[in-house]
Image: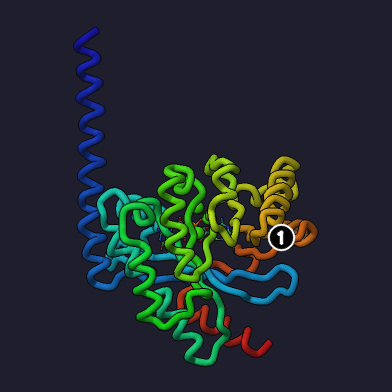
């Protein structure tokens, strides 16, 4: 009856208010964290499967709150996205990633590439081309060593606008990657128009190799398709020797995952680079 319905509505509303309150609290703390330097980048190695060499890293943001400790990006990136904070946050990530990659080179360490994640709003609603140009100019990092990752679902959301932005970024001379490939329902018709250098196979397709025949078929097909379209292919979330062997047999170019290393704080990644310089 009408009364029950209205009670339900009130209950639902209170839940929403609670969620909204939590979000507003998180937003103001995140705003502080950006301003006070409580964000850090961690770096996960990317490995050439054929040679075993370190070719690059992905920068992944971490928030260290003095009280709550580490807060996961899976929790605060969506808040940053929905409040506009992604603008300043994304700008900090880009600037810091370029600065660090160039700092390693200045220390005589290998000239690896660095990958930076862009979220949907950052990609479509901020001046991402101008911001990237500025990060490159300020750091002195050669554009060819910067790779920007955009998720397949972000590209599929507004493909025509996405294409314009991708072209603007590509004109800067950097590399473009599609992140979480296989989960975003993008059409192949759009895909072939995008100026993409690298496909990153989502870790959900790697996790159950070699038990899942379906996932092996999908991964094999993505590798073959990427190659036939002139792209490089990287597998994410590689945790076992068997997964790596499967990827090697099918000619996948690169991998990332705990089998090599978790994302590392800057000091530990620098030690890894020093080891690589000795190889
Ligand atoms: P992503 O871009 O798909 O990043 C890969 C995630 O998988 C990372 O989680 C990484 O730590 C994790 N991972 C790497 N190797 C393995 C593995 O072998 N096994 C498993 N189970 N997981 C693995 P993380 O760092 O918590 O980041 C989560 C997501 O947050 C990222 O997913 C990305 O979408 C977003 N994110 C992180 N940093 C940034 C950033 O600076 N900007 C934006 N816009 N988004 C970011
Ligand atoms: Ca990524
Ligand atoms: Ca991914
Ligand atoms: Ca992801």
The picture places residue 220, in percent across and down from the top left corner, at 73, 50
Instruction: Quickly name the residue at label 1.
Output: 252
Q: Which residue does the image show at 38% across and 72% down from the upper left?
A: 133
Q: Quadrant of residue 80?
A: bottom left
78, 84: nearer the viewer: 84
71, 90: nearer the viewer: 90
217, 207: nearer the viewer: 217
The picture places residue 75, in percent across and down from the top left corner, at 37, 52
Q: Which residue does the image show at 80% across and 59% down from the upper left?
A: 249
Q: Is 46 situated above or below 141?
A: above
Q: How is the image coloured?
A: rainbow
Quarter holding the N terminus?
Answer: top left
**Can residue 250 be seen here?**
yes
In the displayed structure, does residue 98 sit left or right of residue 10? right
Quarter holding the C terminus?
Answer: bottom right
Q: Which residue does the image show at 51% across and 72% down from the upper left?
A: 114
Q: Which residue does the image show at 61% across and 64% down from the upper left?
A: 256
Q: Is 234 situated above or below 104?
A: above
User: Which residue of the protein is positioned furthest toward the top in this rendering?
Assistant: 1
The picture places residue 134, in percent across and down from the top left corner, at 34, 74
């Amino acid at each position: 009856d009408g009364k029950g319905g209205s009670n339900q509505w009130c209950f639902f509303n209170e839940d929403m208010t609670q969620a909204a309150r939590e979000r507003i609290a998180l937003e103001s703390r995140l705003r502080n964290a950006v301003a006070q330097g409580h964000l850090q980048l961690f770096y996960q190695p990317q490995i050439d499967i054929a040679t075993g060499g370190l070719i690059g890293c992905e920068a992944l943001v971490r928030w260290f709150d003095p009280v709550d400790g580490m807060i996961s990006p899976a929790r605060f990136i969506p808040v940053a996205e929905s409040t506009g904070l992604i603008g300043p946050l994304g700008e900090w990530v880009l600037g810091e990633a370029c600065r660090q990659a160039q700092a390693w080179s200045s220390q005589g360490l290998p000239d690896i590439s660095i990958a930076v994640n862009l979220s949907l709003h950052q990609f479509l609603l901020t001046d991402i081309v101008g911001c990237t140009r500025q990060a490159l100019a300020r750091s002195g990092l050669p554009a060819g060593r910067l790779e920007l990752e955009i998720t397949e679902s972000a590209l599929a959301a507004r493909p025509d606008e996405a294409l314009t932005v991708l072209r603007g970024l590509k004109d800067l001379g950097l590399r473009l990657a599609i992140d979480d490939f296989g989960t975003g329902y993008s059409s192949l018709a759009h895909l072939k128009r995008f100026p993409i250098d690298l496909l990153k196979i989502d870790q959900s397709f790697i996790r159950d190799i070699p038990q899942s025949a379906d996932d092996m078929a999908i991964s094999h097909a993505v590798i073959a398709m990427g190659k036939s379209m002139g792209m490089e292919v990287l597998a994410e979330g590689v945790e076992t020797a068997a997964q790596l062997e499967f990827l090697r047999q099918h000619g996948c170019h690169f991998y990332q995952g705990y089998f090599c290393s978790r994302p590392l704080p800057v000091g530990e990644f620098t030690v890894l680079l020093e080891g690589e310089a000795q190889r």
